[in-house]
Amino acid sequence: MSALTEIPAHFPTEFGTNWDHLCQQKDARLAGMVTMHKVNGKESSFNQMDSVEMARVTTRSGETRYTDINLAKRWLRPLPYDLATLLDEWDGEYLGQIALPQSDIVTSHGAAYSRACDDVLIAAATGSAYTGDTGTTATALPSTQKVAVDYVESGATANSGLTVAKLRAAAYIFDSNDVDPDEPKFLAVSAKQIQDLLRTTEVTSADYNTVKALVSGQVDTFMGFKFIRSQRLALDSGTGVRTCFAWVKSGIKFSTAGRSTKVDLLPTRSHSLQIRTVASLGATRTEEEKVVQISADEVL
């Protein structure tokens, strides 16, 4: 009897019976680095008081001088989010030995909720914050809180990725604003910015080993900033410029009531199984002085 040289067509093919989740961010990476606030109702306002300065007394028994204190309001408005998936009543039958992905869908919804938390925080950090008595005044992050994509410490300006010079500039902005030095500083960057640092410190810098450990995940802090990697930071598709940002915990407030997942049979949809996850999310920048935007070119 001759040996088989080909697998006969009638040999069976084994099909997977479970579900594997594709690459995705599954955790909320920024939520633990901001101030949590529970909003009871549709919105919440925060009363803010500006600093005042004392003056030297130069007149005996003179009239008392009064100094007005600038007061302000900042608003946080959570908004509803949802995600729904429908399974037909015959899906369980027609999938055969393949498991109905009910629990896997719930897991996928949980990951989507985590990413939504980060998206809300990213938008609040560098977008408009709402101020005023009624919360209708949009307050943008000023240019004094931004490190430009072409920033250099000396010489001709030129676009660059994330450089040590840009980190020094961000740290200087915080210090010049008298941000509490005891507050930890966080920096949200993409994978490209971490690689940029490795490239700019590679030749002669004593920081090279630290950045190498940062890239490999052995450490997460460099130049006073705790690095948070996120691929969800805004990227201008036309220019290739990524908007990164640094902040302190008190600089951003975040509200979430958590996620709620409901599984229901819908008689009006032929008894299909609906899996729906809902959440209420909102965030605001509390002070412009506590957030620094850093632009990094990813095309270079």
Image (cartoon, rainbow, N blue to C red):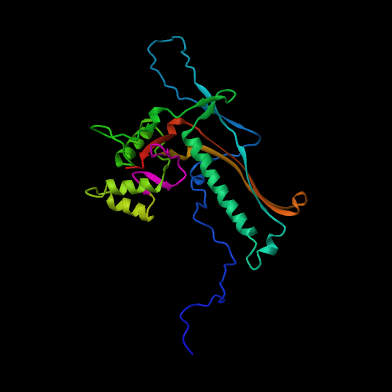
Q: In this view, does 138 lie above or below 292?
A: above
Q: Which residue is drawn at 59% across and 55% down?
A: 107
The foreground one among 118 and 34 is 118
The residue shown at (72%, 54%) is 272
Give yes or no for residue 227 being in the magenta stretch.
yes
Q: In this view, does 25 lie to the left or right of 93?
A: left
- Where residue 233 sits, quadrant-wise, is top left
Q: What stretch is highlighted in magenta?
A: 221-242
Check the image and name the residue furthest to the right. Answer: 267
- State the image coordinates of residue 194 (x, y, percent, origin top left): 36, 48
**Image quadrant containing the C terminus:** top left
Q: Residue at x 51, y 40 (%)?
A: 121
Of all residues, the one furthest to the front in this rendering is 2
Q: How many marks?
A: 0
**Residue located 43% across and 35% down the image:** 291
Residue extending farthest to the bottom is 1
Task: Identify whether 148 is placed above or below 276.
Answer: above
Q: Position of residue 231 (x, y in %)?
A: 45, 46
Between 183 and 140, the residue placed more toward the observer is: 140
Q: In this view, does 35 lie to the left or right of 144?
A: right
Image height of 111 relative to 187, above or below: below
Q: Which of 49 and 59 is in front in this view?
A: 49
Q: In which quarter of the image is residue 142?
A: top left
Looking at the picture, how far across and down is residue 242, in whole percent? 40, 40
Q: In this view, does 134 lie to the left or right of 7?
A: right
Residue 172 magenta-highlighted? no
Q: Percent from the top left, x then y, of residue 183? A: 43, 40
Kindly give the residue lying farthest to the left in the view shown. Answer: 204
Above-or-below relation of 285 to 104: above
